[in-house]
Image (cartoon, rainbow, N blue to C red):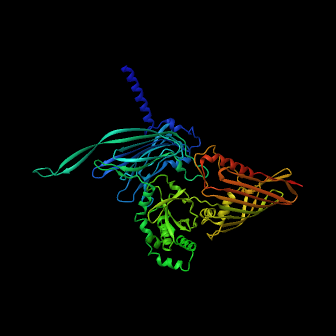
Amino acid sequence: MNKVILIITLIILSNYTVWSQKHELGNVTNDELKEKINAKDTSAVATILFEKGKTYFDYKQNEGFFVMTEVEMKIKIYKKGGYEWANTEVPFYVGSSNRESVSFSKAVTYNLVNNQIEKTKLKSENEFSEQKNKYLGLRKIVMPNVKEGSIIEYKYTIRSPFISNFPDWKFQRSIPVNYSEYMTDIPEYYFYNVHRKGVLTPTEVKDKFSKTLQLDDMVAPHGRGGGYVHDIENINYVDNRTTYVLENIPALKEESYINNIENYASSLEFEHSGTQMPQKAFESFSTTWGDVAKKIYESDSFGSQLDKNNYYEDDLKTLLQGLTSNEEKIATIFSYVQSRMTWNKYNSYYCDGGVKKAYQDKTGNSAEINLMLVSMLRFAGLDANPVLVSTRANGVALYPSIIAYNTVIASVMIDGKLSVLDATSKYALPNILPLRDLNWFGRIIRKDETSDLIDLMPSFSSQDVVNMLATIDVKGQVSGKVREQYLDYNGLRFRENYSGVSKESIMEKMEKRNRGLEVSDYDLNDKDLGEPVVEKYAFKDSNEADIVGSKLYFSPLLQFATKENPFKQETREFPVDFSFPSKDKYMLNITIPDGYQVESLPKPVALAMDKGYGNFSLAISNSDNQIQATIILNINTSIVLAEDYDTLKEFFKKVIEKENEKIVLKKI
């Protein structure tokens, strides 16, 4: 019996050794280096062979606990597109006397040379730090000698004095991950809420360990005698360990019309919920959204900035002279702040140098510009309040936390209707926010420090209106003139995309999008923000009509026809995000060539999606040598839920089929 137990024990230990070696740095094999593709995802440019992380607490005499995080990474590079995975950056907080630190170690690139493993270690000149902004630093490495087929490994350690700054852990990345493990060792004194994101669920194993903390104090001895003696006290406590593991994790791939793919990555987020030190009462850090809003408002870098007005008072009185309606005041103040101030590209809900300095310098972060705007609106007697926002890049604010939001915009109430404003964009308007702000909900904070959620997603449709006069000749070449108008959010998007771009570059981009298209006589009117953007141009297109025998075929939408369905996946796990409701309207008048007549036209159609998500219509007719077509596509919502993806996909399939259904001309 003892021999059987011994054999079983040896087998277990043997398996454990193989397992641990498989996920340890320095264990690179010829077979791994020879591997050409990821068998489960042949399109992958790289694969994370394993990623292991551990966060634990380290005690330092007279300073307390530090949060230590160690991460080990092993990555296989298949293609040149995977080289970016050899360049790594780790952010860390640098904004005060207490700061975090990051160090790299065990950084090696492995290559197979003449069937021998070649190791290239990271040199000091390939490791450096960068200050991203006032509060954030980056520690970077650039791995050496990286080629197709390389394996890279490294370890980094983060040391943080901030107990509340517990790191997140991402299981899912934009490339496949074979194995991901995260272990947390947390003393019994600290409590964290764990928030899970994504559709993949890691396995969890919990355990407890006894630990001893040794405190060494220097005290004066009793009685006679000089000097001090060591007073050593041992404190026993329990460490709570949780190990999370996921294996064979598919790459998180971008899909059409998605907000921020990281919102849906399988990951863990930790929130410091409370602390209970020995012989002390429990101190709760759990927060509600109201707590978050109140704490932010009470900061000197937020609420008190709204009360300052002496720096702009004289300028604003002159600006508002003679204005009587609230609408005029809002438009004037917003335009003034928008034109005077230049955003420094830094998002924050806290001021950096303060609103007064920003006003004098004519530049500032998002808080300085928009808190200044709120203050001016209040000075004008309007009911204005700041709104906390998490930008698209920051992700959706799901859990109450001081870091859930990363910027602030303005709001103003008129006749029971709330308008939202963001003066950081030179092209925004009241109720036309920069697209980065359109991230589901914001949180309005009032003067009395109460707060509520407000919906940031637009409820009205932004139009794109195309008028075309076109002529087709006997060789199938199409020529004509186009007038296109971009309204509301379509206008904002156009201005942001093409600000500072020359007319020649715009024409070149149009021609690249449509093979065979030649654009000339281009004219653009986009100066007046209150008016639609208007494009006018002449065109020739040799690629939109086909001649087969005695017949000529072309789509009624010509170059504006959608060529392929943007929704190709069989299934979809994420909501479809259109950013804003839209109405695309095309009105075309096409003159057919002499010697031809219409043989057939696409039949008029009206399509509609369930739940009122959208509709499509095509009306077409002809008279003599003229064809008139009106095509309208309405998307009536900003977001379509993943559960309705099949409906949306089928709707677009029918729309695209109809858009590409041919008009047939035959020779007379």
Residue 36, by quadrant, is top right
Whole-percent x and y of residue 411? 52, 65
State the residue at coordinates (62%, 43%).
571
Residue sitting at the far top: 1
Of the 4 image quadrants, the one containing the C terminus is bottom right
* Among the 4 quarters of the image, the one containing residue 55: top left
Which x, y percent locates residue 333?
53, 73
Q: Nearer the viewer, residue 505 or 253?
A: 253
Residue 459 placement: quadrant: bottom right
**Residue 109 in sight here:** no
Return the x and y of residue 644 as percentages of the image width and height.
63, 47
Residue 488: image location, x then y, percent: 63, 64
Identity of the residue furthest to the front in this view: 416
Q: Is residue 282 above or below residue 203?
A: below
- Whether residue 666 sits left or right of residue 430 in the image: it is right
Residue closer to the observer: 417 or 651? 417
Vertical comparison of 10 with 469: above or below: above
Residue shown at the point (12%, 52%) measured from the top left: 226
Q: Quadrant of the N terminus?
A: top left
Q: Nearer the viewer, residue 145 or 456?
A: 456
Q: Compared to 319, does 235 lie above or below?
A: above
Examine the rendering and report whether any part of residue 142 can be seen.
Answer: yes
Indicate left or right for 665 with 161 as reference: right
Residue, x 38% and y 23% (percent of image)?
5
Q: How many marks?
A: 0
